Image (spheres, rainbow, N blue to C red):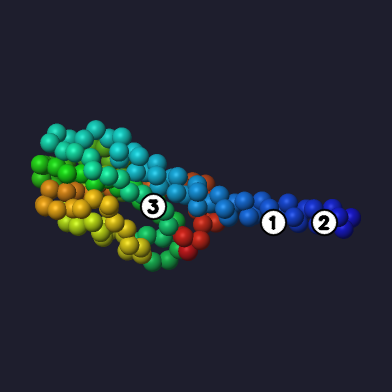
Amino acid sequence: MKKLLITIILIVVIIFLSVLVAAPIVNDNIAKKTADKLVDLPLPSNTEFIETVYLAGKLVGNGNGMQYFGAILIKSGLSLEELKEYYLKFAKDEWECMVERQIDTDIKIIEHRKVTFKTNVEGDNYYIIYSWGSNNTIFHEFDIRGH
């Protein structure tokens, strides 16, 4: 009986530890998919793709909660207003395909971590297109980065 109890406890601990290890991997994958959706969108004319960034964790605001961020950096001859209008047709809600001018390597949208693009941003024709993803699995509850 004692061996059975120890075995059950050991199995429960192994399952719990597996979820703890898997949670960041699953959450990072969701953030990557958020960025990949942006990469897969067709670029407007006179625009080139530069790079992509994604991350998961508590990124903006107060309280607890896992957030999924994906972004692309583009260089375009179009204006901010033209880019906003172009990407609006791909947005399913207000949290997708947001467009802002990118003035340096720092991604200022993210409040709780320093996140940067690798590309040296020079000039006024760089833009960040970003989206916030979502996750309906239990893994967001077990990732320490969301707390």
Mark 1–mark 2 Cα distance, whole angstroms, equals: 12 Å
Q: Quadrant of the N terminus?
A: bottom right
Mark 1–mark 3 Cα distance, whole angstroms, equals: 28 Å
Mark 3–mark 2 Cα distance, whole angstroms, equals: 40 Å
User: Is 55 left or right of 130, judged from the image as shown?
Assistant: right
Three-letter amino acid code of the residue under disc 3: Leu
Disc 2 target residue: 5
Residue 73, image x, y percentages: 24, 46
Disc 1 target residue: 13
User: Is 132 left or right of 128, judged from the image as shown?
Assistant: right
User: Is 31 left or right of 105, judged from the image as shown?
Assistant: right
Disc 3 target residue: 55
Three-letter amino acid code of the residue under disc 1: Val
Q: Quadrant of residue 32?
A: top left
User: Disc 3 or disc 2, which is closer to the eye?
Assistant: 3
Q: Quadrant of residue 35?
A: top left
